[in-house]
Structures are given as structure tokens and as C-alpha cells.
Image (cartoon, rainbow, N blue to C red):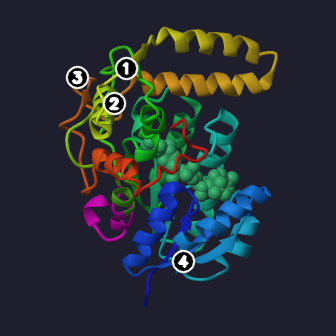
Amino acid sequence: MRRRVCLLGATGTIGRATTRALIRRGYEVVCFTRAPTDSAKAQSRQADAGDLEGAIIKVVDVGDPVALARDGFTGEPFDAVVSCMASRTGTPRDAWAIDHRAHLTVLEAAQRAGVQHFVLLSAICVQKPRLAFQQAKLAFEAALIGSDLRYSIVRPTAFFKSLSGQIERVRQGRPFLIFGDGTLTACKPISDGDLADFLAGCLEDESRWNRILPIGGPGDAITPRQQGEALFALLGSPPKFRSAPVALLDIAIAGLGALGTIVPSLADKAELARIGRYYATESMLVIDPRTGLYDAAGTPSTGTQTLFDFYRSVVGGAAVPDRGDHAVF
Ligand SMILES: NC(=O)c1ccc[n+]([C@@H]2O[C@H](COP(=O)([O-])OP(=O)(O)OC[C@H]3O[C@@H](n4cnc5c(N)ncnc54)[C@H](OP(=O)(O)O)[C@@H]3O)[C@@H](O)[C@H]2O)c1
């Protein structure tokens, strides 16, 4: 019998790639999606529908246990839940509602439905939790580990889309923006396809069961300066950087934080500035527990696609970065 997987977040970047990876491996994939919230979204959903070809799509309110049973699990057998679902905004309210509460509701419904295995897309940055969305993810990770389900918690490093925001400005002859000298942080970028394969592989590879799995892409860790240098080299122009001090973000956080006590929408902006500061100063690598330092060699790698291959295909017109609403991450 074909094994059935409930996939959450199938309309997102990694969710779409994971749908394809699961179908390629022969799973029957049932995507629990939400109804598009506006017509623009409905249109882009239509355009993306090809990515979900071969999957069964159900519209389900994943925050509602009754809807999950009635419209989602519907008494049918499911072997596993794979979740690529995440808050689109990263604001504290959204993060706690999606990354924590909705996941808890799905976990409980999955247990009632007899699901055996829960694969969760998390993030490597939860090892140093300073932001609301990281706390929300960690709280759900703890609930999943404490449940009686088999779990695989995948904590990837940076996605290609998050490192592609400056391709256009560099192509237009403008400088590549860095904080400090561009070597404050490093990461081992992972492609959507390689991460999707790793997530799907968790269902079969016993070494990934009941484990927290930090994971990066192939090759050495790279800094923002190296990303800029690679882009200029691909475009055949001399490297040109503009550096900003991290203190600029501190000023924005303090200002927006103070104004946010009066205007709530500015409190959300302050959180986005905190997220920006975090990524400007923290590496997306495993932290060595003995030294407390980021450890590139200790960060596992998977897959074959490198960020610089991806830059090459964007510059050559063969690929377009999917920046999406989540660009800030
Ligand atoms: N970007 C990075 O470099 C990076 C690195 C490591 C880890 N991560 C982690 O990876 C995850 C993001 O993955 P991604 O970029 O693939 O996400 P994404 O493209 O933003 O997709 C998010 C998915 O979650 C769904 N979703 C959001 N709110 C929902 C709700 N209320 N009800 C039902 N579904 C909902 C979205 O559905 P709709 O299409 O309906 O909105 C979409 O399918 C996050 O957990 C992030 O922390 C990111």
C-alpha cells in the first residue's frame, strides 16, 4: 500500500519542493492548505498549482481541532505528518499562533488519527533563541519531543531565497550591502530541493528518527562578503561594497520599540528590526556546546546544489529567486 503523508505549508517555498520530493518517492501526499485570503493570493496560488500536481489538496483550518478531523484527517489512515508551515510575517502574534499553537492542534489531531511520525521543518537559529518566532518554534519542538510520536526535527541553515535579495541591485551597478566588514557571520546555504529531499528522507532513514537534525548545504561556510564577491565575479564587474554599522539597527530597534508602545504596528516593525539585527550578527551554523562558538565543520551538509550555482542560474536567466513574503528571513 502507498504510504500517505499529510503535508502542512505545501504552498510555501520549501513546502512546494517537499511535495515534489515526496511524490517522487512514491508517497500519496495530502496537503492541508488554507483558503487564500485575497484574490491576489488566489491568483498566485493558481499559478503555483503546477508545483502541487499529483497531490491531493484539502482546504483545512489547521487551528481548529474540529475542522482538522472533519476536513483534514477525515477518519482516513495517515502514516506521517510533514510540516513546512510557518508564520509568514514572523511577528510575535503570528509566530505563536502558527509556529506554536496551530502545530500543537495538528499534533493532537494527528495523534487521534493514529499518525506514527511527525517531521518538522524548524530553523537552526532556535539554538540561540532571542526572537519571538524562535521561542514559539522551540515551545512546539518541546511538545513534539514530549509526545509519543516518532519525530524528526529538521533545523536548516539559510535558504537560497534569503541570500538572493541583492542580485538585482548588484546587476544594476549598485554596491552590495554588508554589516561591518561582511565577515561577522557565515552560513552553509541549502537549496529548496536539497532540503526537501532531506525532509522526505526522514520518513525512511532510521538514523533521522527521534532526533534534532541541524542541516546545511554542500561546501564550505560562506560570509556575506563572499556572497557579494561571487556575484560581482559572475557579473564580470569589480566588487563594490557599502558597509553599515550594526548600531544602525540598534537605533531602529530602540526607536520603533519606544513608538511601538503607542502605535502597535510599530511594535511589529521593531520585531522585524530585531530579526534583521539577529541575522546581521549571528551565523547560521551549529554552535559547539563546549566552546559556545559557531562551528562550520560541525554543521552537517547534504545535497549537491551550491548558492553560487544558483546565483549563476539567476544571472543567466534560468532561475528566479522566490523571495515571497518571508524575504526577511
Ligand atoms: N529563510 C531561511 O533562510 C530559513 C532558514 C532556516 C529555516 N527557515 C524556516 O523555514 C520556515 C519557512 O519556510 P518557507 O520559506 O518555505 O515558508 P513560506 O514560503 O513562508 O511558507 C509558509 C507556509 O506556511 C503556510 N501558513 C502560514 N500561515 C498559515 C496559517 N495560518 N494556516 C495555514 N497555513 C499557513 C503558508 O500558507 P499560505 O501560502 O496560505 O500563506 C505557506 O504554505 C520557517 O519556519 C523558517 O523559520 C527559514
Confirm whether residue 30 shows in the render: yes
Residue 222 - label: none
Q: Position of residue 1 (x, y in %)?
A: 43, 91
Residue 258: quarter of image: top right
Q: Of all residues shown, which one is farthest toward the bottom?
A: 1
At label 2, the amino acid type is Gly
Q: Which residue is mark 3?
A: 291
* Callout 3 secondary element: loop
Q: Position of residue 245 (x, y in %)?
A: 45, 10
Amino acid type at circle 1 is Phe
Give yes or no for residue 207 being in the magenta stretch.
Answer: yes
Q: CA distance from mark 2 to mark 3?
A: 29 Å
Question: Is disc 4 surrounded by few (<14), some (14 to 19) or many (20+) residues within 10 Å?
Answer: few
Q: Who's the residue at 57% across and 59% down the image?
A: 9
Name the residue that disc number 4 marks: 53
Tell me, yes or no, whether the two marked residues, 3 and 4, touch with CB atoms within 8 Å.
no
